[in-house]
Amino acid sequence: MRPWFIFLAVIAVTTACSQAKPAQPPSVKVVRDTVTVRDPELDKRVTRLELQLLAREAQIEDLQTRLEDTRAEVVRAMAKLQSVASRAQAASAMAEAEVALQTMKAGASTEPPEAAQVTRLVRQSATEFDKANYGGALYLANQAKTVASGYRGRLGVSKEGARPGETLFAVPIKLKTTSRGNVREGPGTNFAVSFTAESGSSIIGYSYADEWVRISDDTGRMGWIHQALVARP
């Protein structure tokens, strides 16, 4: 009986060992932290630029207020002086300003910021026209056309894209031609002539590259003219 008992005991121990599961090693949790290293000098530079931007915005707001005040003074002066501007001249300029305004709105997916200013100037012009201040109405209508022309030029620059070395003016600049000269398709004599500007023509400058200025005229034509051919009015 004893051999059989020993035999059964061995079988039981073997079966228990075969059914025992091996122990699993403990899981290891890996934690990865992102460490941001800041550059103190870069932070200072960013702060300075932000402060400079705030200062520029304040200057622009102040200049805009002064410009509005100056316009009001000019309009009041014209009303007192009984300007020689005729009713027909004022009406024509107002119609042109209105067309420019509608063109701005129709050609943009969203209303451009200049549209609000042009709208305000057109309404102010109409108010002075109703007061028989035709000089003031003409002045305000021309101001509206100038703003609209500036928008057309800015839009033209953005569509074409800035050329290498081209620098935009902070704001469009009113210029006039000092002599008859060619307006070219690009900043150089190797570009084709777009049109010829007569001496004394009113133009708007938007940017410059080397000695060439990107401009547009009263009809909306755009191109590049040599710096020697233009001056401030």
Image (cartoon, rainbow, N blue to C red):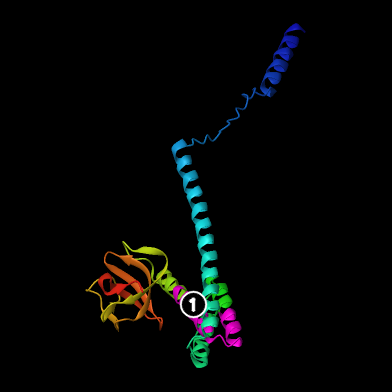
- Residue 118 in percent (x, y) is at 54, 76
Quadrant (top left/top right/bottom left/bottom right) for the C terminus? bottom left
Residue 122, position as x, y percentages in the image: 56, 80
Furthest residue in direction right, as rendered: 1
Query: Residue 2: percent from the left, percent from the top?
Result: 75, 6
- Residue 6 lies in what quarter of the image? top right
Residue 107 lies within the magenta run: no
Our reading of the magenta stretch's main secondary structure is helix
- Vertical relation: 168 (above or below) 41: below
Q: Amino acid at mark 1?
A: Gln
Task: Identify the image quadrant of the N terminus.
Answer: top right
Left or right: 12 with respect to 129? right
Q: Which residues are magenta?
A: 122-150
Closer-to-camera residue (182/166): 182
Give the side of residue 202 with respect to residue 127, left or right.
Answer: left
Instruction: Tell me, yes or no, whether the highlighted magenta stretch contains residue 128.
Output: yes
Residue 45 shows in the view:
yes
Residue drawn at x 60%, y 29% as measured from the top left: 29
Q: Nearer the viewer, residue 43 or 178?
A: 178
Residue underneath mark 1: 143
Residue 151 located left or right of residue 19 = left
In this view, the residue farthest toward the left is 190
Comparing 171 with 155, the one in front is 171
Q: Residue at x 48, y 90 (%)?
A: 89
How dense is the environment of label 1, judged by Cα within 10 Å: few (below 14), some, or many (20 and up)?
A: many
| Residue 199 coordinates in the image, percent (x, y) | 29, 82
**Where 62 sits versus 52, above or below?**
below
Identity of the residue drawn at 27% across and 64% down: 210
> Which residue occupies 33% across, 66% down?
208
